[in-house]
Image (cartoon, rainbow, N blue to C red):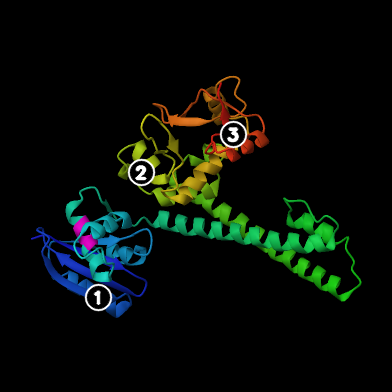
Amino acid sequence: MRVIIGMDPHKGSATIEVVDERGRVLAVGRFGTDKAGYADMLAAGRKYADRVWAVEGCNGIGKHIAHRLVHDGETVLDVPAKLSAQVRVFATGNGRKTDPVDAHSVAMVALCSRNLVQVQVDADLQVMGMLADRRDELGRARTQTINRLHRLLLELLPGGAKKFLSAAQARALIATVKPRDIVGKTRRRLAVELIGELEGIDEKIKAADKDLKALVIARGSTLMDLHGIGPAGAARLLADVGDISRFADRDRFASWNGTAPLDASSGDQKRHRLSRAGNRRINRTLHIMAVVQLRNRTQGRAYFDAKKPPGRLRWKPCAPSNDGCPTWSTHAWSPTRGEEMRRTREGNRGRLCNPA
């Protein structure tokens, strides 16, 4: 008899519930995630010969324990948190959220769903994902360092420095400043320290990009051939998407990454709005690629201009067409921002266009 072992994972503990094919609860337990607790949980699960582990959030909080189970030869299914939440809300018990209730919801999802993804551990993608995360952290650290440096340079130099500032340019600027008071000297010393930190971060970013580029090329991917996709973006796409065949079609993939518009139609009004759901890291990578292509004279820009009707000052997408791209309304946009704001204040509910 096949059993489903539903798990609600946490950092230091995991609650499991074992159910049979009819949904009857066979066992419940709570175990630690250290070596002893994990061994006890694995032994409790292996009492059942035909078993499948269902873990909530295998790309999030459940990743560490799901991968340990896969390494030990267990079959693990990834249960999205949204599905288990739906089961919990519509179950008896007024939707109370406790660890045993969550484990039961996860087990019920795995019992009734037939399209859950089986967790596969790909060492190359794991390494790529870790390096991509590190690259993102370095990018955020560089932004923070630049912001602190700009604040000091604004107090040392009249008007401050330009927005896009490199470490070499900052060092050349700071060399021209020779304060005589103790406040200015301290401020200059802190700026020099920040420039040194910036140089170190830039070196680490270069090394990370070099490693990611080598991994992407070794993977045989051609993502970097796309205009606007660099080593970090290609690695993020490969690591987060994993096996692309797990998506039934491109529409499912667009829904997963948040690029598919959401239908917000009501009555005779047909409209769509931007989706805030989906994998935001993938969505950001695709957004950066689109922006780079629009800013440069590429095929993406040519496709964008072809979709834009003649005589329009700005485009206004209304609904996706058959090829998944936005169509165009029959309204011309107001030429000035002031006119748009005026119409908004008049209670036009944000409609920033005049009748054609």
Counting from the top left corner in percent of width and height, residue 51 is at: 16, 62
Q: Which residue is mark 3?
A: 294
Residue 303 part of the magenta-drawn span: no
Q: Where, by quadrant of the figure, is residue 68 drawn?
A: bottom left
Pointer 2 or 3: first along the chain:
2
Q: Where, by quadrant of the figure, is residue 93 drawn?
A: bottom left
Q: Choose between 127 and 34: the one closer to the eye.
A: 34
Q: Secondary structure at mark 3?
A: helix
Q: Which mark is in front, 1 or 2?
A: 1
**Left or right: 9 in relation to 111:** right
Rounded to the nearest angstrom, the CA distance separating label 1 from label 2 is 35 Å
Q: Residues within 10 Å of mark 1 (few under 14, many from 20)?
A: some
Q: Main secondary structure of the magenta part?
A: helix
Q: Which residue is mark 1?
A: 30
Q: Choose between 124 and 29: the one closer to the eye.
A: 29
**Left or right: 67 in relation to 169:** left
Q: Choose between 93 and 355: the one closer to the eye.
A: 355
| Amino acid type, residue under disc 1 in the picture | Arg
| Amino acid type, residue under disc 2 in the picture | Ile
Q: Which mark is in front, 2 or 3?
A: 3
User: The C terminus appears in which quarter of the rendering?
Assistant: top right
Q: Which residue is mark 2?
A: 244
Rounded to the nearest angstrom, the CA distance separating label 2 from label 3 is 26 Å
Pointer 1 or 2: first along the chain:
1
Q: Residue furthest right?
A: 180
Report the magenta residues as a range: 105-109
Can residue 59 be seen in the rendering of this structure?
yes
Q: Residue at x 59, y 24 (%)?
A: 312
User: The N terminus appears in which quarter of the rendering?
Assistant: bottom left
Pointer 1 or 3: first along the chain:
1
Counting from the top left corner in percent of width and height, residue 350 is at: 54, 38
Q: Residue furthest front?
A: 346
